[in-house]
Amino acid sequence: MYLGIDLGTSELKLLLLSDSGAIVAQAGARLSVQRPQPGWSEQDPQAWWAAAGQAVAQLRSLAPQAWARVRAIGLSGQMHGAVLLDPQGEVLRPAILWNDGRSVHECAALMEALPALPQIAGNLAMPGFTAPKLAWVRTHEPALFARIDKVLLPKDYLRLRMCGLMVSDMSDAAGTLWLDVAQRRWSDELLALTGLTRAHMPGLVEGSEVSGRLAPEVAAAWGLSPEVIVAGGGGDNAASAVGIGAVRPGEGFISLGTSGVIFIVNDRFRPNPTSAVHAFCHAVPNRWHQMSVMLSAAACLSWVTRLVGAESEAALVARAETLDPAAQQAAPLFLPYLSGERTPHNDTRARGVFFGLDHDTDARALCYAVMEGVAFGMRDGLDALREAGTEPGTLALVGGGARSSFWAQLHADVLGLEIVTLEGGEAGGALGAARLAWLADGGDEAQVCQQPAVRQRFTPDPQRVDALAKRHARFKALYAATRGLFPAA
């Protein structure tokens, strides 16, 4: 058995995978985000460790015999978060998360100080990345900055608690702006921009390599052998790609989680940051990937569900599905920028907008507008990838949004691409983490990284494609017309 641990923003998920490739059991524990100021996003790393303990207890209870046969553990997690540790390994402040927007000015300063930064790091300096967060801490919390001994990414804090080791993997490290992404090693030049050195960084391994073993006390508490190995793991998107078998150049997926991602595998480092396209290392050796990223995707659906007081997201979506084509055309437009936006706008000031409300607008129309707006944001990201020279074929849909056939078809119509959902595709990073554990235990990539069985196919409906293209044009014009009106950072 192989255990995958995926540290998301809203939930920590565990998954048990057998060496036949079957998902045996899953468990999870919810997490909350703290927003002490507008545009800030933080979590307490201790809450991650507590959630891990809760999920482990749940999974042990669900599948005790399978649990006892775990040989290796893989880690996946939300990227870019800054976990700051003192020399004793104690957390100095709440972790600053990927969707925190406080470091806008620091990003501009980093780009000015080193214009070559995007070519080394594969990305523009954006507030979501880790380096600008440290630049912000250096400026605004200098006494705390002086006490920093190590900077870890979120999943790697779990590794520290599990193994007593400070290690990261290439895919997650690529999201810091401190990695030389082509060479797959820390960049002294990039680190110096934020007053750091390699001594502040964890060691690096490939995602499919062994990073360490469970500490005896953790193994005893979790009811596992101290011989259990822990794989390098991956950032959540790279791990999700491994989970759906996207490890060969040209393969990829769409992720509808808290954020939204289009992910395409490359056989070499292909930076093209001008449209806020990301270029990162993959979680498997000698491969890279490009991504478009929108900061709020399924999070928008959660938000509108709370807004209208619906009993659940699924119940609200079911109501939205009853809209006929004329009602869909009459629905308001929605800009899904509740946390600002990355690809293609790189605009931390952008916010959500409903446009075109009238007396007939109801909860169904608002839900449809949100789902459509997220799909339009994904289309903008796809166009940016195409400008970067990447032309995807069929894409798998993963993440919580993959549960909705209605949303999947809407994406196929908006993107003009065939979309497939896969058996176990909603498992996302947890499945990929378990597969990376299997690889670290000696598994063969061709066997381990097979694409799961296709659950459903969605092909573009020509009648809807044209109508949606016209609404997408209005969507783009709406952002262009309003972007100068959002409050300054």
Image (cartoon, helix red, strand yellow):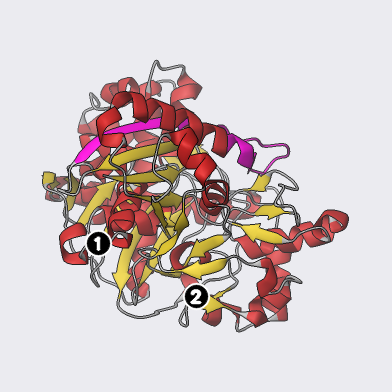
Where in the figure is residue 221, as x and y percent of width and height? Answer: 49, 34
Q: State the mark number for residue 122.
A: 2
| Residue located beneath label 1 in the image | 246
Where in the figure is residue 179, as x and y percent of width and height? Answer: 55, 74
Which image quadrant is residue 147 in? bottom right
| Amino acid at circle 1 | Ala
Q: Secondary structure at mark 2?
A: loop
Q: State the mark number for residue 350.
A: none
Q: Is residue 195 magenta?
A: no
Q: Nearer the viewer, residue 192 or 384?
A: 192
Which mark's residue is nearer the viewer, 1 or 2? 1
Residue shown at 31% from the left, 36% from the top: 68
Residue shown at 22% from the left, 52% from the top: 396
Determine whether 106 is above or below 390 in the image: above
Q: Nearer the viewer, residue 379 or 137?
A: 137
Task: Assess disc 1: are there few (<14), some (14-19) or many (≥20) residues with their C-alpha within 10 Å of its C-alpha.
Answer: many
- Magenta span of residues: 23-48
Task: Assess disc 2: are there few (<14), some (14-19) or many (≥20) residues with their C-alpha within 10 Å of its C-alpha.
Answer: many
Q: Nearer the viewer, residue 98 or 447?
A: 447
Q: Is residue 28 magenta?
A: yes
Where in the figure is residue 384, as x and y percent of width and height? Answer: 39, 67
Tags 1 and 2 touching, CB below 8 Å? no
Q: Is residue 48 left or right of residue 8?
A: right
Residue shown at 72% from the left, 77% from the top: 192
Where in the figure is residue 418, as x and y percent of width and height? Answer: 16, 54
Q: Quadrant of the N terminus?
A: top left
Residue shown at 25% from the left, 48% from the top: 397
Residue 472, can we see it? no
Q: In terms of sequence position, does the residue under pointer 1 or pointer 2 come before the other?
A: 2
